Every structure is written in structure tokens, then in C-alpha cells.
Amino acid sequence: MAILQTPYDNRMKITKVEALYLRQPEVKDQCDSGQDAVIVRVETDAGITGLGEVDSAPLAVKGAIEGPYSHSITSGLGELLIGEDPFETEYLWHKMYKANSYCGRRGILIHAISGIDLALWDIKGKALGLPVWKLLGGGFHKKIRCYASNLFGATPGRTEEIGRRLVDEGFGAVKFGWHPMGESRELDEALVRAARRGLGAGPDLMIDAGLVWDAKTALQRANAFAAEDVFWLEEPLRADDYAGYRKLAGATPLRIAAGEHESERQSFVQLMDEGQVDVVQVDLTRCGGFTEAMKIAALAYDRGLPVANHGFSTYLNVTAALHWLNAIPNGLICEFVAEESTNLREQITRQKLRAVDGYLAIPEAPGLGIDLDEDAVSRLRIL
């Protein structure tokens, strides 16, 4: 019987784990998480380096990854991985989780694990010469529909202008979010009307409220927005108001979307079962990486729920999401940032993702298929 020979050496060991804190010179007071970044780099003795990203509080994540051992249930993550086999992703995920059960069952430690897990899968793909989605068992798409993700314009008029531009660029789905949503009923409704005017009757319109209302107010807004054919209303309530989400989702015909604030599958179970949301949004750089995201997608599938990614940071985040969405049966659409700003997105990776007629291509290169621009990293690195 013929045995397939692969380039993988089962003696490969992890030799270094580091978190690179990148930051642009000026960080504006707005909800744009692409203004700084934490890139995780995992090196091996085989000369293969994996990349990951964490969209979270940069210095907290760096401490979680590069910090020292404290005791048996609180430890820096990188120290736990030195000498380990990077292919053992499930085992290593649980090793990191168990070693931080005292301080990190959710939140920052799970975020940090996410970046490491992405890097480990990147290593596996590079070692085997296969894209990560194929290692995950995927192949559901040849290309993935995306939506252009933006902040609202400062005024309804500016929002309308942005909508027209994005339709002209070929997008068939557009999301607007955050400030100045929530300032008044009149302005909220004017912003959504302007967004629809800019898009016209055809494209899907998503609205990200940015956690600004209570359940009663959110229901009033949802009823008003329904006239503008809103595809989903995203995160109108504070992140842990599961009771409010349940009331809202049961009372409006609009799809209610949420999930970017959750980390690891138990919190997503709460969101789905207690919150009864209609669309589950998963950020690969926060939820626990590929290893956990596959479980979250399966839990959503069992409940008949579609999933979408969240990613408002770098192309590394979006690329990871494309691999994941291509590996699950209930992927709905991919978030693709179209915000016009001078953030890190266009600077720190050699590959620049571009949507064509509202779709993104599936990565085919080994691993994640994305590389750092080392000159840009050196220029923007803080720590």
C-alpha cells in the first residue's frame, strides 16, 4: 500500500512565541480597531513561522502571551508552548485554557489564545503545503459574498454619499454603524433613511447600532427601520443583556445579529439560547481561534442559525475568516472593511484583499496565505 509522503517532520517543536504591538502615530476617538494591532508570531525549529492576530487590548494581550509562569492555573501562554508540537492544536488549546482557569476563562486570555491558535494552524498549513480551510475539512465555496463595513457618516447626507460610492464599487451589501447612532430618535431614523437612499432599492443594508439602547428603545427603532428593508440590526443592546436580546428578537421581524463581544463557545451558547439572536457573529481573533470557532459554528448549525465573521482590523483577520467560512456549512457572509481611513490595514501585510463585484476570493496558498510587510511592522511597532 502506497503511503503519502508529506514534508511534515513530526519532530517539529515551537521555539518562540511573541506578540507584536503595532500602532499608528495618531489614534482617533472612534470605533475603528484598525488603528492598532497585536500580531502573534510563533516560530519553530523547522524554520516555519506562523502568524495570528488578536483584536483586543494590546498591552493586556501582550502580557497574557509573553508574561511569566505564576502558578499552576495562571501562566503566560507562550511559556506553555515552548518545546511543544505545533500540530497538536486541540491539545495545546486546552493546555493554555486549563493553565489559566483562574484568570482567563473568558475575555483577554481567550483573545490571546485566539492569536496563538491562528498561528499554529498557519504553521500546519505551511508545513503540509495546504490552505487552512482544507485542513479544516472545508470547500463549501469558490468565492464568498462580503459586505462593505463602514462607520456612519457624520451626517445623514454624508452617509448617503458613502452608500452611493460603495454601490458604485460593486458591493451588493453594506453595513453602517456606531456614532452618531443613538443621539436621538430623529437622527437615528434619518441616518438609516439616508443609508437606504444611498444604496438604492437592491443592496442589503445592515445597521450596527453600537450598544446604544435598552430593549424597549431598540424595538421602537427596529420597527421604524423595517420600512427601509434592513437586513439585520446588529448589537443594539449592551453585550451581556441576553434577556433584552431575547425580548427584542421575539418581537421584531428584523434579524438581530450579535457575537463580536463573546469569547469561547460557552458565551456563544448563552447568546444563542438565552439571547435568541438570529445571526451569530464570530471574530476569529477573539473567540479562541480556528479550534474554537469550528465548535461555535457547529453549535449554531445545530440551532439552525447562520454565522458571519466579525473583523474590523487587518487583512490577517479577514483572511482567517475566509478560511473558516469556507470550512462550515452555515456561513452567511463575510465582513469586509471599506472605511476610508489611514489605519494599519493597508500597511502591515504584503497581500491587500480586494472585493470583486461584492465577493472575496478563497485563499489558496499554504497556511493562511498572508505575510507581514516587515518594513511596515518595524516602522509601526511600539513593543
Image: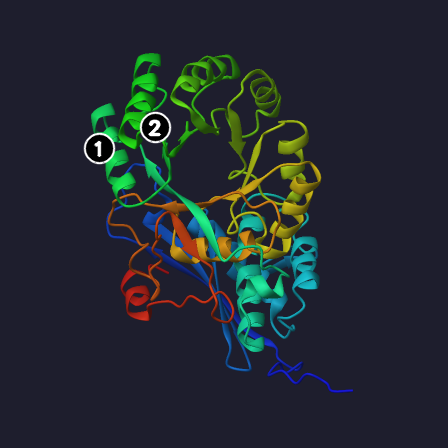
CB contact under 8 Å: marks 1 and 2: no
Badge 2 marks a residue whose secondary structure is loop
Q: Specify whether 214 is left or right of 32.
A: right
Residue shown at the point (58%, 76%) measured from the top left: 128
Percent x, y for residue 273?
A: 68, 30
Percent x, y for residue 218?
A: 47, 17
The total of numbered circles placed on residues is 2
Q: Specify whether 383 is left or right of 319.
A: left
Residue closer to the observer: 118 or 145 = 145
Q: Is residue 68 visible?
A: no
Task: Choose mark 1 or mark 2, whichever is in front.
Answer: 2
| Residue 201 tag number | 2
Residue shown at the point (50%, 58%) measured from the top left: 142
Percent x, y for residue 304?
A: 66, 36
Residue shown at the point (32%, 35%) measured from the top left: 151
Badge 1 marks a residue whose secondary structure is helix
Give residue 14's quadrant in the image. Answer: bottom right
Residue closer to the observer: 288 or 104 = 288
Which residue is label 1 attached to? 161
Give the alpha-carbon distance from disc 1 to disc 2, as whole Å: 15 Å
Q: Which amino acid does label 1 sit on?
A: Glu
Please state, as top left, top right, bottom left or bottom right, where the N terminus lies in the image.
Answer: bottom right
| Residue 122 tag number | none
| Up-down relation of residue 253 to residue 132 (above or below) | above
Q: Sequence-wise, which precedes: disc 1 or disc 2? A: 1
Q: Which amino acid does label 2 sit on?
A: Ala
